[in-house]
Every structure is written in structure tokens, then in C-alpha cells.
Image (cartoon, coloured by chain):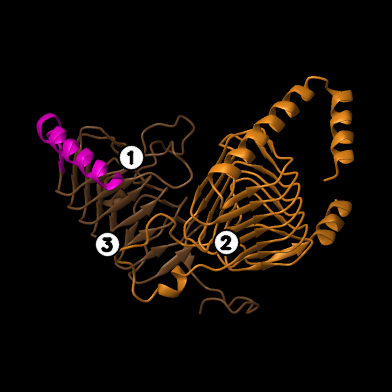
Amino acid sequence: MKDAIAKIRGYFFILKCRYTKKNISIGQGLKMYCKLGIRGRGNITIGRNCIVSGINGDKRQYVIIDTGNPEAVISLGDNARLFAARIHAKFEITIGDDFLVEESGIIDTDFHSINPDRGDPQENKEMCRVRIGNRVSMGTRSNICKGVKIGDDVVICPGSIVNKSIPSGNVVIGNPARNLQFSSRGDKAGIN
Amino acid sequence: MNYYQIALKVFNKLRKNPKSLYYIGKAFIRGFLYANYYRFFKRNIIIKMPFFAYAKLNIGGIGSVFIDRGCSVHYNTFDGLNIITLSTGAQVLIGKRCHLGGTTIRCQKKIVLGDDVMAGYCLVQDTMFSANTLGSLKAGSTDILSPLDIWIGSGVWLADQTIVLWGSKIGDSSVLSIGGLCCNYDIPPLHFAAGNPVFRSASLARIDSFRVSL
């Protein structure tokens, strides 16, 4: 029952975007289990079979995709699963296929400079854009900062903050995010 | 908690602040209604009386939940207490006289909280991805995705914005500091741990000795 309602809701949202908002293009098979808030005048493209949903345990949160600049670009691949995600772009965010994210944020700008007057930060597109590969999954309450490039098959554990690039095939945790290791004291026979 | 102790607690609070009796009574009645609702409509959830609900309580899922007597749910900047069980074999056991405010618990296997636990706006989760693990994830990382038990001892203090992840054990009356993340690590009893992620912990007696020297 819920799936059928989500499919119908997604179908009407695609129709609404096709006739009223020309800057948004969404592929077929969108499922909306909760509200999808799209703001701004930048270009947004979402692939096929996307799932939009809230998070278990907090009913007030929903998915936000936001462009702060008319020249900003956000592109999501196929089979994206967004659970209470918050994506904000000033320049460019590109995400590959099979992306999984829960209750966490992706942002590619600092909004303000470090100077006391908090004026314009001197940022450009090449320095700040975020590129994320295929089959990446993010845990709850984590964050991706500006200028980060993430490869394929990366797992980001819950509670981690990523501010440096990650090569493909890694599992990262912590603030700042580093590779997962449990052999530091050897007191526990866990993973590895 | 004995009824005599409850009466003493109420009397002491009433002597200091007479208005607090109204709030305690309101919380008691609200907790009574919650406990009876879950008793009659959801058989997998057991809440023992007395239960003080100062804030909202939300329990969902198909696993079993047990809350012992004397617990209380408090207001924080966020909601009261959220417990979500993700599979049929999931077990959440909460001991006596726990004070929980703004806590979310997501369980797939087993989570145990001892007596007298204080917890703020924190997350206790024994899986990597709670929402939906279907579809294509990385082939080599299947071990990481399997859930492991969490055991939290009695008298533990979990501060605000902490995260307790799979496989971690926290000993009796130890403290996890603000912003800490504990993942597959043993904190011994009477120890203080901080950092994201936690790599080492100091005993509380050693920290007290620092304070004397200052």
C-alpha cells in the first residue's frame, strides 16, 4: 500500500516538474515516501528508480536538494536511495550510480570567509566542486565538505566528517575521516 | 525503586518547589497511559510501572523491547525517546531508573542498557545502515555490515551528540564525553573516554588527580 502511494506521488511530482520547473529533470520510477524539497534555480538532474524517504525514528526530517546559485549543477545517477539527505550546491556536485545516504549532508561551499567582516569567500569552481563515484554509501550523521573527490565502492561510517579525498575501495570513520582499523590495541577480536 | 523511595523523592521536591508536584503527576499519568497502550495493542513491548514520561515516546518495529521500572523520559532540544527495532530477533533491554532525553536507539540484534544510565541527545545503533541495506553494496565489506551486540553497564553517562556503534562495550559508571564516537571498542569500568573515534581512555581517579594539581 505504501509503495503504491509512493509511486503515484512520484509520478505526479515528475509531471509537476516537467510543466512548471524547467530546470529539474527526473528519470522514471521515482518513489516518494516523504516530502522532497527542491529549491533554487540551478540545474538538477536525477536518474531513474530514485527512492526518497525519511529516516526511522525522526518523522520531521525530509530530503532537501538545494542550489544556491543559478549556475549551480547537481546531478545524481540511477538507483539513488536518499533517506533524509541534505544536499546544497553553489558550484557543482556530481554523484554516480547506486548511491545510499542516511540523515547526513553534502555541501560544497563555506558561505563566508574567515575574516572578521565575514565577506565573500574567494572560491572557484575547480577548488570547491564535489565528485562522488559509483556504489558509495554514507551512514547517519556524517558530512562531506567542499573540494572532496571520492572514488568507487567507498563506505563512510556513521558520525564521520570527510574533508579530504578518498581513493576507491576504502572504509573510513571519524573526524577527520581515516581508514578503519581495530588493531591499535588488539584487545578485541572484531573485524579484521 | 521502592514506593517508599518514590514518596521520599516526591516529598523532597515538593518542599523545594511546590509546583513540581504538578509536573511529576502529569508525567506519571502520561507514562501510565503509554504503558497501558503498549500492553494492550503491541504485545512485543513491555513497560514496567512507574514510568515518568516528561516528553514524547516513540517505539516502532517488530522486535521486542523491555523497559524496567522507574525509568523517565525527559525533554531535550530534540524529542524524548525513539526506539526502532529492525528485525524480528531484535532485543532492546533497558534497566531500572534510567534517565533518557533525546535518545534514539536503532537495533537489529541486541542492545542492553544497565541501571541508572543517563543519556542525552545520542544515537545507539548496532548496524552500519539502518534504513535499507537492499541492493548493491560493496562485495568485500559484508563483514562490516553484519550487526554486533552493544552492552552498556550501569551508571554510565552518555553526553550530548555521542554515537555508540556496533560491537562496543562500556563498563560500569564510566563516561563518554561530548561528541565521542565509540565503535567496536571496550571502555573499562570507571573510565573516561573522548574523541571521534575513541582510541584510548583514562581512569576517573587519574583525572581527579589532575584537578587537584591545578
Q: Residues within 10 Å of mark 2 (few under 14, many from 20)?
A: many
Quarter of the figure with residue A100: bottom left
The verdict on residue A14 being magenta is: yes
Are the residues under marks 3 and 1 on the same chain?
yes
Q: Amino acid at mark 2?
A: Pro
Q: Which residue is mark 2?
A: B197
Q: Which residue is mark 1?
A: A34
Chain assigned brown: A
Tell which residue pokes out farthest to the left in this image: A19
Tell which residue pokes out farthest to the top in this image: B19
Residue at image location 74% in from the left, 27% down from the top: B25
Chain assigned orange: B
Are the residues under marks 3 and 2 on the same chain?
no
Q: Is residue B90 above or below residue A127?
A: below
Label 2: chain letter: B
Q: Amino acid at mark 1?
A: Cys
